[in-house]
Image (cartoon, rainbow, N blue to C red):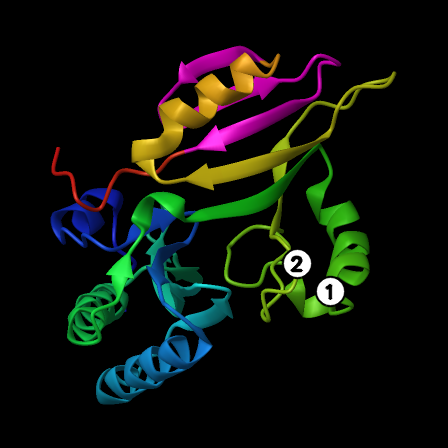
Amino acid sequence: MDMLRGDEIAEAELTDWRKLAQGLHARYLVDDFGDGARFVAAVGEAGDEIGHHPSVSIGYGYVDLKLVSADAIYRDDEGTEHVVEWVTQQDVDLARRITEVAADHRVDADPASVSVIELGLDTARSATIAPVWAALLTGNPGAQGHGTPGDEIRDVTGRVPNLWFGDADEHEGPRQRFHVEVYVAPEVAEQRIAAAVAAGGTVVDDSDAPSLTVIADQDGNTGVLCVAASPTTKD
């Protein structure tokens, strides 16, 4: 099934869900574990009907859901097809159905609270160093390039954050190579940036804002705040 572009996801108007990194994410607030378990059971039944299911995490007062297809089709500029992890129509269909299930269970969504952390490593030799990081992070060589046409490290179980590789020239001398990617809902991005600046941080690059905003701490270490197009906003 073809992967969906950002504008196609936005046109779906998924009020409870936000597109972060590769998938759709939602948080639903529950009164206790029992309510959460019953809600998840109903979500499972809805997934059975479609033949697709979300990843689920239950915590104190919330249920987190992630929807992504492991067999999405991506076509590069040459027309070559790649199987990747990304949002497809089946994720959109199930997201809509889960929103209905949540209404039936009187469970409220908290879309502004969703976030995803990934790691970035700048290198000129991703193919050379990726096997080391696949072994260190996951213990599985198959994690290199899993769900991506590149060398990105992705643990199929979701135990550790994804590690992707950014292009960099070979160089001598120390410099920051690792940085944190923080994906947040569009409606909280400005607030998150303002809070970081108020705490002493500095915006060092907002040329790609609102999609990417690079923030440095007082020691010069940088992180990137990432925002995808809102699924509830049509451009």
Above-or-below relation of 205 to 80 = above
Q: What SS does tag 1 mark?
A: helix
Which residue was labeled with disc 2?
160
Q: Position of residue 78 (x, y in %)?
A: 36, 47
Disc 1 marks a residue whose amino acid type is Thr
- Decide if residue 77 is in sight here: no
Read off the residue under disc 1. Answer: 138
Q: Nearer the viewer, mark 2 or mark 1?
A: 2
Occupied quadrant, residue 108: bottom left
For the stretch drawn in magenta, what is the main secondary structure?
strand
Residue in view at x 62 percent, y 36 percent:
180
For marks 2 and 1 on the same chain, the one whose residue lies earlier in the sequence? 1
Q: Does dot 2 land on a helix, a strand or a loop?
A: loop
x, y percent for residue 208:
40, 20
Residue under the image location 28 percent in, 54 percent down: 17
Q: Relative to the observer, which residue lies in front, 128 or 66?
A: 66
**Where in the figure is residue 187, as x and y percent of width and height?**
29, 33
Q: Would residue 163 be found to the left or right of residue 5 on screen?
A: right
The numbered mark at residue 119 is none
Mark 1: few/some/many CA within 10 Å (<14, 14-19, 20+)? some
Q: Residues at badges 2 and 1 in contact (C-beta under 8 Å)?
A: yes
Q: Work out how far the residue at label 2 is from the one at label 1, CA to CA, in angstroms.
A: 8 Å
Give the residues drawn in magenta, as a range: 202-226
Q: Residues within 10 Å of mark 2 (few under 14, many from 20)?
A: some
Most foreground residue, 80 or 122: 122
Task: Indicate the position of residue 197 as horizontal and vertical percent values.
Answer: 53, 14
Quadrant of residue 178 in the image?
A: top right
**Quarter of the rendering containing residue 36:** bottom left
Q: Is residue 122 left or right of residue 7?
A: right
Q: Is residue 54 magenta?
A: no
